[in-house]
Amino acid sequence: MLKPFVLVAGLTLAGAAFGQNAADGAAISQTIQNQMDAFKARDAATAFEFASPNIKGMFGTPERFGTMVEQGYPMVWNNDEVRYLELREIAGRLWQKVMIRDASGGLTMLDYQMIETPEGWQINGVQILPMPGIGA
């Protein structure tokens, strides 16, 4: 079994391409990791703190947010290992690609849209991506 770890890769190059710096990349990955840790601890209230105002407005309460993640993103709710891949800009938005190994050993690729707020970097949405090398 793999031990949980965090790998921040390519942030300096990706950040330089769109005016971000390595500190932003580190802060973004730390925000996502903090939320992952909260979900793993089943602490929806803390996980909710890392969501953007838009996400908070959509769900209203940490409990509803936690239920959505548990049901819609079980790999996040039951995360075991998190790898941070490239941070990039798409259409003026920052996206952090993340690969998660869940508690049962399954791998999932996710894309986190990040926004900077007065409270720091926050998660503004998550998309499930196809795994590389896996076709229909």
Image (cartoon, rainbow, N blue to C red):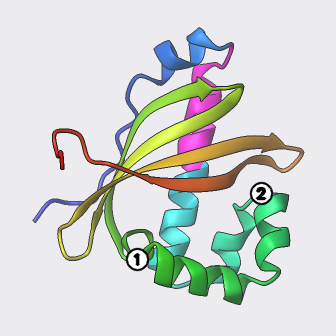
- Residue at position x 76%, y 77% in the image: 59
Residue sitting at x 67%, y 53% = 123
Along the line of sight, the residue nearer the viewer: 129 or 21: 129
The extreme left residue here reads 1
Going by the numbered disc 1, the residue's amino acid type is Pro
Up/down of 70 relative to 21, above or below: below
As for residue 63 lying within the magenta part, the answer is: no
Q: In the rendered image, which residue does mark 2 sit on?
A: 52
In the drawing, does residue 71 fall left or right of residue 124? Answer: left
Report whether 125 appears left or right of 107. right
Q: Looking at numbered disc 2 in the image, what kind of residue is underneath it?
A: Ser
Query: Mark 1 — residue?
Result: 74
Q: Is residue 113 above or below residue 17?
A: below
N-terminal of the pair, mark 1 or mark 2, is 2
- Give the answer, above or below, for where 64 lies relative to 100: below
What range of the chain is rendered magenta?
19-30
Query: Around disc 2, counting alpha carbons within 10 Å, would you say few (fewer than 14), some (14 to 19), or many (20 or more)?
Result: many
Which residue, as the protein is rendered here, is positioned at the far front? 136
Q: In the image, 42: left or right of 101?
A: right
Q: Is residue 29 magenta?
A: yes
Among the 4 quarters of the image, the one containing residue 43 = bottom right
Which dot marks residue 63?
none
